[in-house]
Amino acid sequence: MPQAPVPDILPALPEIWLAVAAMLLLMVGAFRGNASTRMVSWLAVVAVAIAFVLVLSGSKETGTTFAGMFVVDSFSTFAKELILVGTAATLVMSMDYIRREGMERFEFPVLILLATIGMMMMVSANDLISLYVGIELQSLALYVIAAFKRDTLKSTEAGLKYFVLGALSSGMLLYGASLIYGFTGSTNFEAIGALYTQAGQEPSIGLIVGLVFLISGLAFKVSAVPFHMWTPDVYEGASTPATAFFAIAPKVAAMTLLVRVLIAPFFGAVDDWQQIITLIAILSMGYGAFAALRQANIKRLMAYSSIGHMGFALVGLAAGTEQGVQSVLIYLLIYLVMNIGAFAAILTMRVKGQMVEGIDDLAGLGRNNPMLALVLAILFFSLAGIPPLAGFFGKFYVFLAAIDAQLYTLAVLGVLSSVVGAYYYLRIIKVMYFDEPAESFERPIGREMTLILGASTLFTAFFVVFPGPFLAWTQQAAAALLP
């Protein structure tokens, strides 16, 4: 009787390491109780750092394992590095918050690690089945994280809304995957890609319908319009560290997964899915810009901001070229750093021991805390796309990719949406520097938060000086994906 081949586990060593670390930390917390939360959090940061080193030291050659369901290449390596940086930043930012808010439960950092494993599996998925397993591993942990502040009604409501709508999106994704399997006879990305590129066959109507459902399920994960409805309520209701996590690592994972799904197996059907992505991008940019104009809660405003930013990233994907994929990766890199800084600043908004979330609470910050106001001004100017800050270059590269692909209408609408969106970022800066001072925020903010704010601000301000290494990094990742 022939024996089943033993899979090569080395390509998946970072994921295996994080899984083992999460289980060990779960046991530490179970035996030592909630008093060990801070220790478990720091150990989780160490585990993430080791995983980052394992990702960096892995093979640079493209390779698959687990019967072709798991792929490691420069594209997945790039995405994993961003995800791990976002995870580590979230863990560090959350420590003081969960202590002050009475949320010291060791499960929080463990759940973040489990969600990170799911994200890393997502970006290395080379099969519709492994794609779904990765998404569900991430999503199940995120549902609990959203409702983790269980003594507040808003947090519980956020977790429930996220769970119900997430289950709906999973159903749509599974239905699309089943249609794709039915019309291609395979769930493997390479096999599907070979069927419609090498054989030169035209995609059937059934395959296109399946692809539409698959894109719909993935669009929910990036909160693209019209699958965005969960985002504002979940961002506002969840604890601030959970909101920061939702806005950073899962967005990067879901967007890179969407890029891989559309480019790797369905590059031959680019003319069909390009129309869908273009429509979603236009709706996301427009809705994100206009819906945020009247927001008074800064976390809710960041939710609409993230919807708009995912729309801008989709502009690069709509180009369907190597340049377009590279522009998406540059945008995600800059988006990650800007949002880490923005949410670190939001986590410093405390008055008399209580978190405040109103935009009006920032009034007079330029006089009460000039350094924090300067950091926020740089980050929000960058989010608005004001040159010469990093956010400008993110938008510049995706619009350039769209123009080179002759998507002129998409590029023009993107620029107009960016102009409208700049208003609500500039409104925050106006409140900080020109309104009558509100009550000062508590100080000091802590060494860890100072370091995160400083690093993100320096990257945002001085990206224009050293873009070369990042452009080369993203170009290598994009080239690994395209056939």
Image: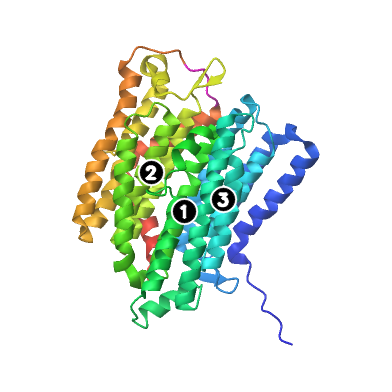
Q: Name above or below for residue 247 compared with residue 259.
A: above
Q: Residue at x 37, y 65 (%)?
A: 479
Query: In whole angstroms, how far apart are the C-alphas of marks 1 and 3?
Result: 11 Å
Q: Residue at x 39, y 67 (%)?
A: 209
Q: Are marks 1 and 2 in contact (CB under 8 Å)?
A: no
- Between residues 202 and 206, which one lies in front from this camera angle? 206
- The magenta stretch is 441-446
Of pointers 1 and 2, the one earlier in the residue sequence: 1
Are there few (<14), some (14-19), or many (20+) residues within 10 Å of tag 1?
many
Q: Secondary structure at mark 2?
A: helix
Query: In whole angstroms, how far apart are the C-alphas of marks 1 and 2?
Result: 13 Å
User: Does the magenta portion include 135?
Assistant: no
Q: Residue 153, percent across and down?
A: 58, 30
Q: Secondary structure at mark 1?
A: helix
**Residue 76 seen in the current view:** yes
Name the residue carrying label 2: 307
How many numbered marks have been drawn onto this rendered protein structure? 3
Q: Name above or below for residue 214 compared with residue 53.
A: below
Are there few (<14), some (14-19), or many (20+) residues within 10 Å of tag 3?
many
Query: In whole angstroms, how far apart are the C-alphas of marks 2 and 3?
Result: 18 Å
Name the residue carrying label 1: 254
Amino acid on which disc 2 is placed: Ile
Of pointers 2 and 3, the one earlier in the residue sequence: 3
54 vs 468, left or right, is right
Q: Residue 202, percent across and down?
A: 33, 78
User: Does the magenta portion include 445?
Assistant: yes
- Between residues 180 and 473, which one lies in front from this camera angle? 180
Name the residue carrying label 3: 139
Q: Residue 87, percent across and down?
A: 54, 44
Amino acid on which disc 3 is placed: Ser
